[in-house]
Image (cartoon, grey):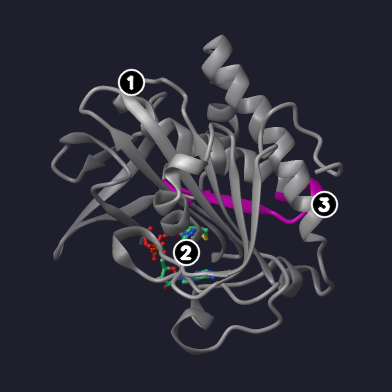
Amino acid sequence: KSVLKTRWLAHQLVHLESVDSTNIWAKKHQHELRHGAMVLAEEQTGGRGRLGRSWESSKGEGIWMTLVLEPGLPMHDAGKMTQLAAAAMHQAVVEVTGLPVKIKWPNDLLVDNQKICGILTEVSGELTRIERLLVGIGVNVNQQVFSGEIAEVATSLRIMMEQPVSRVALLTLFLKIFEKCYDDYVLHQSYGAVLRVIREHSMLLNQPIDVIRGDQRVAARAVNIHEDGRLEVVYEDGRSELLAGGEVSVRRK
Ligand code: ATP
Ligand code: BTN
C-alpha cells in the first residue's frame, strides 16, 4: 500500500495469485468491495475480452486488474469511463516506456499495430443511472513471446522495449493519473484533457474503416470521437452515425 501515490484509488486492494477473471471475481464479491477498490491478479485462467472473447493472462507477466467505481453518473456516460481509462493508461505507458502508443477506439492500446492493452468495462445499475462500474484492464508487460493465434495481434512492452519493464512503476503511475482524470471529470466536470489524449493518439480518426455488426461489414470513415465517447462515422452514401463501444467492432482498412 505504501508504494501507492493515490488519495483514494486502490486503497482497498485485493491481490490474488490466480483467478478465473478479475472482473468475474469482483462481481462475485461485490458486497465486500467499496468504491475505489482494485482487484489485481498475477494470473487469470479465464480472462475475458469483449463479446465473450478470451484474454490470455500469463502468470506474473502482465497487469490484470479490475477497478470498482461508483461515479454516480447517468448510464449514457459509461462509455466515457472506458475512454478515461484508455487515456490514463496511454499516458502512463508513454511516460514509462516512451513507446509510440496508439489508441484503438473504443478499448485497446496498440504499439506497431499490435495490442498491448485491452479494457473491458462492465456496468450495473437500472436503466438511467450507473450503480457500479467494473473497469477491467489487461496490460501485456513482460511476456517474451506469444504463441498460437494471438501471436499475430499481441505484443508486450518487453518485446517492444527489448528489456523488462517494471509492473509496479507502470501500475502506480497509471493509478495516479487515472485518479486525477477521474476526479477532474466526476468532481469537476472537466473531461477535456482525456478527450485531447484520445483524439490526438487515435489510430482510427480520419481513416477508412469497416464497421462490423454481427456478420455485416460496412465501409466508412471515422471522423470524430464525441465528448460522450462515441465514434462518429460517415458511410460511403454520406449517412453518418454515432457508434457506442458496446455494439460494434471497427477494423482499419
Ligand atoms: P474489437 O475491435 O471488437 O475490440 P478485438 O480483436 O480487439 O476486437 P477484443 O474482444 O477487444 O477483440 O479482444 C479480445 C481479442 O484479443 C482476442 O480475441 C484475442 O485475439 C486477443 N487477445 C487475447 N489475449 C490477448 C493479450 N493478452 N494481448 C493482446 N491480445 C489478446
Ligand atoms: C479487450 O480488448 O477485449 C478487453 C480485454 C480486457 C482484459 C482485462 S484483464 C483484467 C480484466 N479481467 C478480465 O477477464 N478481462 C479484463
Q: Which of marks 3 and 1 is nearer the N terminus?
A: 1
At label 1, the amino acid type is: Pro
Q: Tell me where residue 67 sits by quadrant.
A: top right
Number of the front mark, 2 or 3: 2
At 36% across and 36% down in the image, what residue appears? 223
User: How far across and how far down the image is residue 58, in percent?
Assistant: 60, 76
Q: Which amino acid does label 2 sit on?
A: Ser
Magenta extent:
93-107
Mark toward the start of the polypeptide (2 vs 3) = 2
Helix or strand or loop: what does disc 3 sit on?
helix
Q: Which of marks 2 and 1 is nearer the N terminus?
A: 2
Helix, strand or loop for disc 2 = loop
Total numbered circles: 3
* Pointer 1 residue: 74
Q: Which mark is residue 21?
A: 2
Q: Is 147 situated above or below 97?
A: below
**Badge 3 is on which residue?**
169
Crowd around label 2: few <14 · some 14–19 · many ≥20 (10 Å): many
**Residue beneath the point at 47% across and 51% down:** 26
x 64%, y 34%: residue: 178
For residue 225, say whether it is visible.
no
* Quadrant of the frame with the C terminus: bottom left
Say whether residue 102 is visible.
Answer: yes
Q: Position of residue 62 (x, y in %)?
A: 66, 66
Residue 79 location, x and y as percent? 38, 35
**Residue 83 shown in magenta:** no
Frontmost of labels 2 and 1 is 2
Q: How crowded is mark 3: few (under 14 residues within 10 Å), some or many (20 or more)?
A: some
Give the Cα distance between marks 2 and 3.
23 Å
